[in-house]
Amino acid sequence: MKEMIGLIGVFSYLSLLTIGGGMAAFPEMKTMTVDIFHWLTKEQLVHLYSIGQMAPGPNMMMIAGIGEWVAGPAGAIAVTLAFFLPSGLLTLWVGRMWEKLTDWPWRASIQRALSVVSIGLLLGGVISIGKVVLVGWHSIAIATLVFGVLMATSMNPLPLMLASAVAGMLFFR
Amino acid sequence: MSEPAPSVSIGEIFWAFLVIGATSLGGGVVGYLRSSLVGSLKWLDDETFVELLAICQSMPGLNASNMAILVGDRLRGGAGAAVALIGICLPGGLIMVAAAAALDSGAHDHPLVRAALRGVSAGAVGMVLYVTVQLGLKTIRRPADAVFAAATLLSVSLIHESVLLALITVAPIAALWFQRKRKSGDRQ
């Protein structure tokens, strides 16, 4: 039970550090889970993280793995709720407030500012991931092809992602 | 606010986000979300998508989970938000629980899986770039828009990827600028 309270406390706190992406909270996650609470070793954390890279869905679902590791399935559920609910409820509240503020004179300007900043953030994200992922001409070719085909056809990206997986098996094994 | 949200059932919302949660490999969940919600399902238009994404990016929490919550809430209120969040987290969560359960059994490295994932990650970069271009074409309509987007990009790319910094510097300046423009009768 003490473990559960610790897990919920730590991951609720981490939840609020994830402005601009889950990785923003990673250094603090390592400090809390490895150095302070000794729930797992640094190697185990990195191992879970690398498996998490392969899992679909939100990129920090590895946290469910930490919960399971420390306190079984109940721990996994507790950690997931603790990690997604505080930030989620805050966002839900802000989203609803935002909808109600239709006649606030500043609303349109702030919305536009945030939307424009959003595009810059998306592009920044593409560049920072690209720097890590695009090494060598094989990976650059895959990214360029996917981009080109989507620009030309606007098709569903899933088949292209499957094709990228097959190309990865051929090039990177 | 664009047109009212179409009437979508709780079950449809859960299923849509479960599929996104199960298929969004290699990062770039924004791309999978747009392809499904704006593209095939037509539950949102690009303008609304950017509006919700902008809220998510300026709040704590992951874009994937916060987008699920906001879209679910738009479509079917609190219950919609809850099932969307569960749907997008469930597949990856189950995989991670299984992985953690096997953590001590000296999990082997799977070179083929790793290779496939490297391919998907490269593809995802192309996909997210495409989505950024599409959303950018709808959002960036004037020189000032481009300047503020570029300023954001510079602040996150050059200065250690501090999103918070961009949000507390570029966003307020941009908001002031747009507000002044509106006041001066420049019809946007």
Image: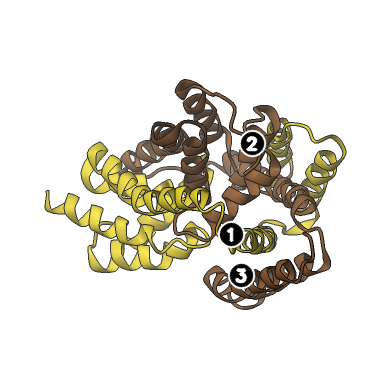
Chain colours: A yellow, B brown
How far across and down, in percent of the image, does residue B188 sit? 77, 59
Instruction: Determine the image quadrant of residue B19.
Output: top right
Alpha carbon separation for disc pair 1 and 2: 20 Å
- A132 and A172: which one is in front? A132
User: Which circle, 1 or 3, is nearer the viewer?
Assistant: 1
How far across and down, in percent of the image, does residue A64 sit? 35, 44
How far across and down, in percent of the image, does residue A1 sit? 12, 48
Instruction: Tell me the subunit letter for badge 3.
Output: B
Q: How many marks?
A: 3
- A142 and A57: which one is in front? A57
Instruction: Tell me the subunit letter for badge 2.
Output: B
The residue most toward the left is: A1
For label 3, count other residues whose C-alpha is less than 10 Å away and answer few (under 14), some (14-19) or many (20+).
many
**Residue A7: mark:** none
Instruction: Determine the image quadrant of residue A43.
Output: bottom left
The reply to whether residue B2 is in sight is yes
Q: Is residue B37 left or right of residue A8?
A: right
Q: Which residue is mark 1?
A: A107
Residue A122, relative to residue A155: is it above or below?
below
Residue type at tag 2: Leu
Residue B178, relative to residue B89: is it above or below?
below
Residue A128, relative to residue A168: is it above or below?
below
The reply to whether residue A58 is in sight is no
At numbered mark 2, what does the secondary structure look like: helix, strand or loop? loop
Quadrant, the N terminus of chain B = top right
Q: Which residue is mark 2?
A: B44
**Residue B171: mark:** 3
